[in-house]
Amino acid sequence: MANIFDLSTPAKRFRAIAFWEAVTWAALLVGMFFKWVLGHDEAIKIPGMVHGITGFTLFVLVALATSRALKWDGRTTLLALVSSVPPFGTVVFERWAARTGRLGELSRPGTATTAVSAPGLSEA
């Protein structure tokens, strides 16, 4: 099993921050339940601040740094940034990026984004 505290590469840092952003989203959603359903107005102050600073802002900065380091195209970078808006979107994006070969060493072998021609077909 991989060490989740290994932040030695841009892809590993991205994966860790994507997960952390989702954790802070979950805490904020719990706080929103306490505020809006149970009437505890102060319930979202700390989770909201933690999510805003260490979840959302840090994710955006790490996504931009990862985009540059891994040479993502504009579409992939935009998808990464947009994934920080819906709850748990960063985890969905991270899984997609790993599956499609966009997360360097974290991607599965044989998932490069380059097209491979099928045997027996020739380009005309």
Image: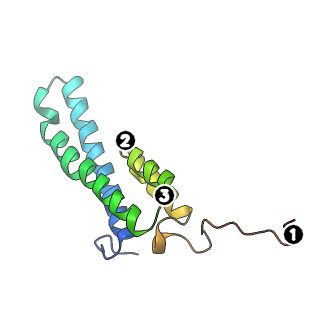
Checking the image for residue 87, the label placed there is 2
Image coordinates for residue 34, horizontal then vertical, percent = 20, 30
Image coordinates for residue 53, horizontal then vertical, percent = 19, 48
Checking the image for residue 95, the label placed there is 3
Residue at the image position 87 percent from the left and 69 percent from the top: 122
Q: Does the residue at mark 3 contact the one at mark 1 (Cβ under 8 Å)?
A: no
Q: Amino acid at mark 3?
A: Arg
- Relative to residue 49, is residue 104 drawn left or right? right
Disc 2 element? loop
Whether 9 is drawn above or below 95: the answer is below
Q: Which residue is mark 1?
A: 122
Q: How far apart in space, not on screen, are marks 2 and 3 (Cα)?
A: 15 Å
Mark 2 surroundings: few (<14), some (14-19) or many (≥20) residues within 10 A: some
Q: Amino acid at mark 2?
A: Pro
Image coordinates for residue 85, horizontal then vertical, percent = 36, 41
Observer-side mark, 2 or 1, equals: 1
Residue at the image position 31 percent from the left and 52 percent from the top: 60
Disc 3 element? helix
Q: How far apart in space, not on screen, are marks 2 and 1 (Cα)?
A: 45 Å
Residue at the image position 31 percent from the left and 77 percent from the top: 8
Q: Amino acid at mark 1?
A: Ser
- Relative to residue 116, is residue 113 drawn left or right? left
- Relative to residue 86, is residue 42 drawn left or right? left
Give the quadrant of the N terminus. Answer: bottom left
Residue furthest front in the image: 124
In the image, 21 versus 27, the foreground residue is 21
Image coordinates for residue 40, horizontal then vertical, percent = 13, 27
In the image, 81 versus 93, the foreground residue is 81
Of the two numbered discs 3 and 1 on the same chain, state the one appearing first in sequence.
3
